[in-house]
Image: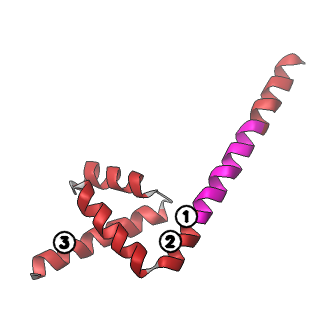
Amino acid sequence: MGDSSASYINLVQHLIEECLIFNMSKEECMEALSKHANIKPVITSTVWDELEKENKEFFEAYLKGRDQRATEIEKRQRIQKKLNTFSSTQ
């Protein structure tokens, strides 16, 4: 692998890490990098998969945390909807 290929992969890895900071899913990251950095989704997917293999425990915790946050958001939305319904009947 040439130096330019290695630096390109390092760039994609760095951008994926930025996506992780913003709590993005793999699909969201693929879309964002395609749109904003002109990186083909297959490249992002391949690098993401390799990162997952190398950092299995991190990604397990990351995905679990994403699922928990999604569940919390859904609960808050249901509570807010009930509160709005209650407020409108008063």
Q: Residue at x 79, y 38 (%)?
A: 79
Label 2 and label 1: CA atoms lie apart by: 6 Å
Residue type at mark 2? Phe
Residue type at mark 1? Leu
Any part of residue 14 in sight: no
* Residue annotated with mark 2: 59
* Mark in the foreground, 3 or 1: 1
Q: How is the image coloured?
A: secondary structure
Label 3 and label 1: CA atoms lie apart by: 26 Å
Q: Residues within 10 Å of mark 3 (few under 14, many from 20)?
A: few
Q: Residue at x 74, y 44 (%)?
A: 75
Q: Is 63 contained in the magenta span?
A: no
- Closer to the camera in the image, 83 or 68: 68
Query: Left of 52 or right of it: where is 72?
Result: right
* Stretch in magenta: 64-78
Residue type at mark 3? Tyr
Dot 3: what SS? helix
* Residue annotated with mark 3: 8
Where's residue 67, x and y in %? 61, 57
> Residue 10 lies in what quarter of the image?
bottom left
Q: Residue at x 18, y 79 (%)?
A: 6
* Residue annotated with mark 1: 63
Q: Do the residues under discs 2 and 1 have CB atoms within 8 angstroms?
A: yes
Where's residue 31, x and y in %? 33, 49
Question: Mark 2 or mark 3, which is nearer the start of the sequence?
Answer: 3
